[in-house]
Image (cartoon, rainbow, N blue to C red):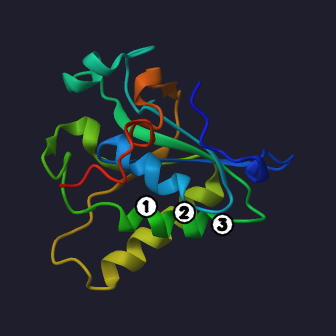
Amino acid sequence: MFDVISENRKMTEKTELATFGAGCFWGVQAAFDELEGVLKTQAGYLGGHVENPTYQQVCQDNTGHAEVVQITYDPQRISYQELLERFWQLHDPTQKNRQGPDVGSQYRSAIFTHSETQRQQAEASRAALQASGRYDRPIVTEITPASQFYPAEEYHQHYLKKKGLGSCHL
């Protein structure tokens, strides 16, 4: 397994999960891997109705799953609010079911919450961003409780790092 977490970022006793969909998971994973306090990231699928979906199934846009990154983080070193701020920076939350050249509901903007506190923070963050005037169009990011997470195939994990790429943006 390819491990990009350094020795000084080992798991602590108190960790939490955050799960975000912001388009293709390769760039999203790489961006969250850069943050101090993020202990582990995993690309995967969430939010659909098919058990153990494959990448090929998800790409057909009929499983209901989004490409997501599930983040294990140390809340003593990075807050959920800081993770939300990075999430909003990574994509255009006004695009419905697409990001850049990637089109389909699997690329939707989504926050999958793991607690009531996360839901409240995510909704407040979305409302504040909408009120900020940064976007001319409505923010379409869905906020829903996290369901079963399915890890993506190994070749997708830390894909950009494996390929020696800094980003997947043209």
Q: Mark 3 points at which residue?
A: 79
Q: Where is residue 140 in the image (x, y as percent from the top left)?
A: 26, 58
Q: Where is residue 166 in the image (x, y as percent from the top left)?
A: 37, 53
Q: Check disc 2 and give the amino acid type.
A: Leu
Gap in angstroms between the C-alphas marked 3 and 2: 7 Å
Instruction: Determine whether 7 is above or below 84 in the image.
Output: above
Decide if residue 132 is in sight here.
yes
Identify which residue, 85 or 26, lies in the foreground: 26
Q: How crowded is mark 2: few (under 14 residues within 10 Å), some or many (20 or more)?
A: some
Res. 87 mark: 1
Q: Residue at x 47, y 42 (%)?
A: 69
Q: Which structural element holds mark 2?
A: helix
- On-image quarter of the N terminus: top right
Q: Residues within 10 Å of mark 3 (few under 14, many from 20)?
A: some
What is the distance, in whole Å, between disc 1 and disc 2 at their CAs?
6 Å
Q: Which amino acid does label 1 sit on?
A: Phe
Residue carrying label 2? 83
Provide the secondary structure element on which disc 3 rests. loop
Please give the name of the residue rendered at 53% of the width and 39% of the height, measured from the top-left corner.
146
State if disc 2 and disc 1 touch (CB < 8 Å): yes
Report if the CB atoms under discs 3 and 2 are less than 8 Å apart.
yes
Snapshot quadrant of residue 88: bottom left
Residue 29 place in picture, x, y as percent = 45, 46
Mark 1, other Cα within 10 Å: few <14 / some 14–19 / many ≥20: many
Q: Can residue 111 be seen in this view?
A: no
Q: Above or below — where is 83 with respect to 113?
A: below
